[in-house]
Image (spheres, helix red, strand yellow):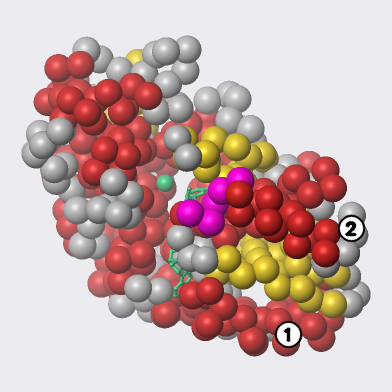
Amino acid sequence: MNDYISDADSQVTVNLASRSYSIEIKPGLLNQLSKALGSFVSNEHVILVTDSNVAELYLESVVSQISEIAQRVDVICVNPGEESKSIPVCNELWQQMVDFNTDRQSVVVALGGGVVGDLAGFLAASFARGIRFIQIPTTLLAQVDSSVGGKVGVNLPSAKNMVGAFWQPEVVLIDPLVLETLDEANFRAGLAEVIKYGLIMDVDFFASLESSADLIGQREPEVLTRCIARCCQCKAAIVEEDERETSGRRAILNYGHTYGHAIEAVFGYGRFLHGEAIAIGMTCAARLAREFGMVPDSFVTRQTELFRKMKLPVDCPAERHDELLASMKHDKKVARGELKLILPVRIGEVVVLAAPEDQLILNSLKN
Ligand SMILES: NC(=O)c1ccc[n+]([C@@H]2O[C@H](COP(=O)([O-])OP(=O)(O)OC[C@H]3O[C@@H](n4cnc5c(N)ncnc54)[C@H](O)[C@@H]3O)[C@@H](O)[C@H]2O)c1
Ligand SMILES: [Zn+2]
């Protein structure tokens, strides 16, 4: 059935010389933490960072398991949502870490979605010039994207993810069963990033997603495990080539993101989840590539059909296109004033190109 990944592949290694680490993906892993974390936090001081939604579901069990092996566990619980990824919140939490007698031997463990992972990672990267860090991601987006690769950080009032660091975790522990409690919208939004990996670098994976779309939608644990593992392999391969986004290779992860970020910014962060915005963004990028003759119409149709199958939006709102264009030009991926776009050439391959004249971009926003 789903032969794109063998059973043995639920462990993925991110090879980064002395910063290498392993990603473990296993249903039920959240109930085996004393074993999984044994060699990382044995007799250490742990600062567990989470948000109140995740805390309600999993904190008690996680703290009790880590307490079996750690010297002591202090908990930092933030409000759910993007607002917690901010300097004022960090300011409070740095002080809390001092009050917890955090030192260079302490370990920060992030239990939550991308917000918690980015925030906790930034606390770890910045406190005492950097302390150890472990990721236990609990949303699909965090499991396939944000927990892997070492980008951590917070938002400024005027700019998302503007202050941060590259700070790799020591291990990433992924339990696909925690996705059972994730709401449908966030689950579907995570699938947009999953599909993105197929589109940018792995045609076989894309085909597997097409054939197992129903099982994935039903969150069938074994299928999800393979799917998450494949995504982590893809992300690891790119991060290994371009850890700090200097060669340009890592930029391909931004397929659909220049459009998507603009859609999020212009229509407000409440209207579209990030994954929804990038599904629309990838659709616009595909249309632009078709306009250039880079892909045939059948490419756009095939991509769009999978998004639809996964119940993701593909239509850009019909209004405010001038604002979208202006916002795209302000995206932080605009290097030296030049807007670059990631465009597909076939399923499994994209290229980075200088953006064309405004009118062509505006045309690509039209459904
Ligand atoms: N560092 C990176 O490379 C990177 C990459 C992509 C995105 N991000 C960042 O990730 C963030 C978005 O992450 P997200 O989509 O995971 O959002 P999130 O962390 O806000 O989580 C979404 C919601 O799901 C809840 N939740 C988490 N796990 C749950 C579970 N198992 N069951 C029930 N509810 C659960 C959370 O409390 C929250 O309300 C953004 O801030 C974005 O900038 C970072
Ligand atoms: Zn994204």
Q: What secondary structure characterizes most of the magenta part?
A: helix
Q: Secondary structure at mark 1?
A: helix
Residue in the foreground of this view, choosing between 360 and 263 = 263
Quadrant for the C terminus in the image: top left
The residue that disc 1 covers is 65
Figure quadrant of residue 356: top left
Which amino acid, by three-letter code, is at mark 2?
Answer: Asp
Amino acid type of the residue that numbered disc 1 sits on in the rendered structure: Gln
* Quadrant for the N terminus in the image: bottom left
At label 2, counting other C-alpha atoms closer than 10 Å, the crowd grade (few under 14, some 14-19, many 20 or more) is: some
Residue at 63% of width from left, 32% of height from top?
244
Q: For residue 207, which quarter of the picture?
A: bottom left
Residue assigned mark 2: 103
Check the image and report above or below for 346 versus 362. Answer: below
Queried on whether the Cβ of the residue with tag 1 lies below 8 angstroms from ligand 1, the answer reads: no
- Could you tell me residue 46's position as x and y percent? 79, 69
Secondary structure beneath dot 2 equals loop
For the question of whether residue 316 can be seen, the reply is yes
Question: Which stretch is magenta?
Answer: 83-87
Closest to the observer: 76 or 178? 76
The residue under the point 42% across, 13% down is 337
Mark 2 CB lies closer than 8 A to ligand 1: no
The answer to which of 146 and 239 lies nearer the viewer is: 146
